Image: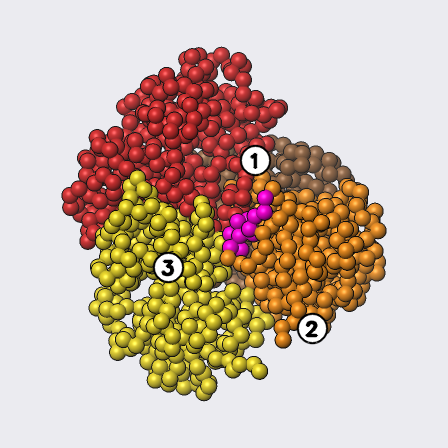
Chain colours: A yellow, B brown, C orange, D red
Amino acid sequence: MTEQKIRIGIVGARAYTARELLLILARHPRAQVAVLQARVDDPVPPGDVFGVLRGMDLPDIVDVDFSHLPADLNAVFLCLPHTAAAEYAVPLMERGLRVIDLSADFRYGSLKTYESVYGVTHPAPELMAKAVYGLPEIRRASIIGAPLIANPGCYPTAVILSLAPLMKRDLVVPGTIIADCKSGVSGAGRTANDVTHFCGANESLKAYKVAEHRHESEIEEQVSRLAGETHTVTFVPHLVPMDRGEYATVYAKLKEPMTADNVRRMFASYYENEPFIRLMPGSALPDTKNVANTNFADIAVRVDERKQRLIVTTAIDNLVKGASGQAVQNFNISYGLPETMGLV
Amino acid sequence: MTEQKIRIGIVGARAYTARELLLILARHPRAQVAVLQARVDDPVPPGDVFGVLRGMDLPDIVDVDFSHLPADLNAVFLCLPHTAAAEYAVPLMERGLRVIDLSADFRYGSLKTYESVYGVTHPAPELMAKAVYGLPEIRRASIIGAPLIANPGCYPTAVILSLAPLMKRDLVVPGTIIADCKSGVSGAGRTANDVTHFCGANESLKAYKVAEHRHESEIEEQVSRLAGETHTVTFVPHLVPMDRGEYATVYAKLKEPMTADNVRRMFASYYENEPFIRLMPGSALPDTKNVANTNFADIAVRVDERKQRLIVTTAIDNLVKGASGQAVQNFNISYGLPETMGLV
Amino acid sequence: MTEQKIRIGIVGARAYTARELLLILARHPRAQVAVLQARVDDPVPPGDVFGVLRGMDLPDIVDVDFSHLPADLNAVFLCLPHTAAAEYAVPLMERGLRVIDLSADFRYGSLKTYESVYGVTHPAPELMAKAVYGLPEIRRASIIGAPLIANPGCYPTAVILSLAPLMKRDLVVPGTIIADCKSGVSGAGRTANDVTHFCGANESLKAYKVAEHRHESEIEEQVSRLAGETHTVTFVPHLVPMDRGEYATVYAKLKEPMTADNVRRMFASYYENEPFIRLMPGSALPDTKNVANTNFADIAVRVDERKQRLIVTTAIDNLVKGASGQAVQNFNISYGLPETMGLV
Amino acid sequence: MTEQKIRIGIVGARAYTARELLLILARHPRAQVAVLQARVDDPVPPGDVFGVLRGMDLPDIVDVDFSHLPADLNAVFLCLPHTAAAEYAVPLMERGLRVIDLSADFRYGSLKTYESVYGVTHPAPELMAKAVYGLPEIRRASIIGAPLIANPGCYPTAVILSLAPLMKRDLVVPGTIIADCKSGVSGAGRTANDVTHFCGANESLKAYKVAEHRHESEIEEQVSRLAGETHTVTFVPHLVPMDRGEYATVYAKLKEPMTADNVRRMFASYYENEPFIRLMPGSALPDTKNVANTNFADIAVRVDERKQRLIVTTAIDNLVKGASGQAVQNFNISYGLPETMGLV
């Protein structure tokens, strides 16, 4: 007997993250894409928007209109800019749909931080308390059955995974965390401009939003919560001439002297049963190439013992573990499905 | 005694071709950039538009306004879309300025072909007869002292150079020329869209405008003129994930059997004194990398003797020999300067 | 009840094609990787050779030694250079194993052509008659149950698919076929040299082996066989700065005037039930990006009616439809499995 | 009257750095390339090694043999691995030639550090005292007339320039410097292997030699010398999929609270007359693209005031300011020529 499919919708279906969701869900035995919406004048086949989707059995992308959602829909992925996501989440949740939001709208515990960092008024602050932060490796229990999941930012995913085992044991000196991150151009989204133009991005490496990127506050809130004390993070993102991939090089001072082996064992223990964490063996280091198109986070731990400084390097695919793959992982957990379904 | 500088202006100073002109002219001992114009709200330093120009001693880019041109200006380079270029050329020429136009407006002998191919009414057909086609290797004599030079298209430059020695001797069977061309993304200009977006262009190779690109007619007119009989050309351009560089692979049937050696000697003789043609020795083949940032055209000749088919491969930098370098070459010839000034 | 797995081995397990096979077979419900061999000093986990394979449940790569093959092995994929493949095929076939050979050794009907083109003595000419040419879209029937399948070259796959519907009806004028092909660097294999070095390949486009690439003869033999008359092909490959992807732009003269619509309909009919052929709709053209990591061949047909010239563009992933994906497609057909198993 | 040329030689003429030297020296009005040596079986034209050099008037590259150096040679650039450089420097200096060494052999004040870090015995320790560290922005005076110049490493160039104004005033807290650096693949040299293979490097970002790269010690020695107290540096290099370009993101704690404006003014004052330092205006940040093929170092200064942390970003072209351009800058200074000759 075939089990019943969970019928899902995607709003914002022209985003890169929507394309990735569709590629992943095509291999998912329990999810069925029932509706695709985006701001379009006329219905358009997904294959006309993303040629890689040609030939797949998918509904056309239609204009955003919640009055025409299928009656038997179960869950919706929101691939929308912030504030639009929260606004749309309200009517969807009122209809009893589970919502997995890939925007920043429900990532924060603190309304004040969100509104200050994003410079907007939150459209649905009453939903914030219902939302869970969807980083399974640190919040799995709360994701089960959750009606509203805030999918983490791509940079926070890589940085928090680099630190979680240590923060949990409160081993990091506050004020010493530096996260030097590097992202492929798809991290900048589909907006076409001088920066994302091939001739602007190719043969170009550059920092941007030095110590003023919004993800800094998201990281700070989560690592502080893990540690049980306030941590600041200096976060500097860089744009790299590659399509996909994200790399975090995280530096911190340890509260007590530890060898690299000690720290590595701590990570190995903390991530022991995680299906998507690959701790690098021996002298191997993460490489974005090795996680491309996968939901893996590859992590290597080093301690510069002479300087008592921790150095963790983590590679993820920003569009998969950093966005759509993690969204499906959260979807699986939420519905009690095997966590890796559709993802390996 | 220092010789007097020729004072030049650039209209359309925000184009890639303008950036290349400025980089070349910075090394040119006889040219001085006196004015830069483009559609801008406020004057802007060129270094703010193209960071590579920072620190160079250049005037700000000001809004297009011919009533404020310096009194002692000598020549103007037009880095503008078609029709805009012809429109602007009129008042500039009336003021006695020499014009080097990088658009298609004055490349055609036939007004009818131009208007049909570009789908517009020519704004200044009366100037067409004054214009010379600025491909020095085939029209050098007419460029000397010319008041209006039509800088060739990038693809036509590569394709015509691949064929000229044979066309001149009428050795090619009409109807057999195929030009399979490949261009880096800068050939698509600064317009930011899904195609020029890094994530659209990277790891992507694709044909476009198959047998319907406007340059096809420009090539046909020029090779027919060289041969003294009508030739058609099948021209298929492709977009390649690189910044700059253009490659023409040209196929044709020869009217009489020739060995590769024969053809090679013919090319060697035809291009003997050309400072910017490098005929590949032995088994070497052109590579866009080897002509990047140079005004060279690297050419290799092959004959598939079993099939009596000529195969010529030519590499140029689309922004230099295919645009701004050739414009300076034309400028040098026009003013009687050493042809390579500023270019090697 | 779970169906029994078909146990397979890979010899030459350090090749890019072996990595692709392992990625595909990991999603294949009926294949099980039982043994991996390559020239290695000590057994090595596949994840140490290709980081992307880390964490997969795979046997170590051991040195080539057919005396230690598992007793219940069913089939072997050979990812080896030519002559080595044929040499190894002999003992494997004697043990009753099915062999899918990714080298050129069994692709030819003519021993003479093979030995002349490859400049070697064939190590196992007696097996040539048992081999089938594994391009399912033109030879599906003969692949069913075949004990020895010669997986086609990557270029021939793209070029033959561009021409098959027309050759079958003998609509192409002999001597007029030109195949201008472009390949990503993985097509050059894992050999590290000046050409495959990032600084040699990046920002570089270049032709190589102009009209002297070995695949030319393979294409000629197959299209002649389809047409029932001798065709020559002028084949010029180019190296493009991308990882994977192959593009064929094929030109030919038609024996009788046809419109683009006519030709398109003919292709649509010929490829009607093919699961891996996507005929481009409307004005769309193939793009290597859209077939990356898939077994699809995207094909667009054009006729330059003014010049009566056919232009077909085809994009494949050289490592998938051009190698390992097609090998699995052949494996599926050979064993009577659904043809798309593991491939979509 | 034309001034006499300084006749120079290059040993190790097949290195990327030699190619860059030849491109720069071709525009240098006072230098003449008199001899090119490398380990070659037969003399080879430079254009056969690097196609970009075709057509340039250069001597063939001959085998290394100091008994056949031109009698009127003045200076030699060494583009050699460490130890080979020092070994060759001895006979060259005995002949009275000025030596500009691009290897690490003479970069250290401490023999012990050099021998420990490089794991070798120094072949010519007696020359170390004669050598000057050729970073003009901090050691210009000592370079004038110097007989032996140790050209700095590419990473140290970027990192030291990021810190020099602050170290000079002793404003940085020891033990807090972190240099997170990113380099294009040419930084890994011409060696062809899995890492430099296009398919290994493209779409790949990875850290390497985390806190164990040899340049760490070179940086530590120089910044300590500038500050007059011992500083340690945590240095993590990353490989980026681009040809050329190097980016340093340097973090440090300041000894006393300073605003970004204060620090910026300090940098502006320190680098006021430097022809190759471009301090970024306003919100602009360095971009490797903007310094490609130039000798510029683009520097931006930030202070995360909330966390009292300095963040400096610096971009250079690793082959120019990071190697051959700086070598010519040193050559110019050494000979009393205008420092920018051949470089702008």
Labels 1 and 2 share a subunit: no
Could you tell me residue B270's position as x and y percent?
A: 65, 35
Q: Is residue C190 visible?
A: yes
Give the amino acid at mark 1.
Gly
Chain letter of disc 3 in the image: A
Measure how far apart labels 1 and 2 are at the Cα level.
49 Å
Q: Which residue is mark 1?
A: D51
Could you tell me residue A254's position as x and y percent?
A: 27, 49
Give the amino acid at mark 3.
Tyr
Which residue range is magenta in the image? Answer: C42-54
Crowd tier of the residue under label 1, counting other residues whose Cα lies within 10 Å: few below 14, some 14–19, many 20 or above: many
In the image, residue D216 above or below residue A54? above
Q: Which mark is residue A159?
A: none
Q: Is residue C326 visible?
A: no
In the image, residue C132 above or below residue B96? below
Q: Secondary structure at mark 3?
A: helix
Labels 2 and 3 share a subunit: no
CB-based contact (under 8 Å), mark 2 and mark 3? no
Q: Is residue C45 magenta?
A: yes
Q: Which residue is mark 3?
A: A270
Chain letter of disc 1 in the image: D
Q: Which residue is mark 2?
A: C273
Quadrant of res B137: top right
Give the amino acid at mark 2.
Asn
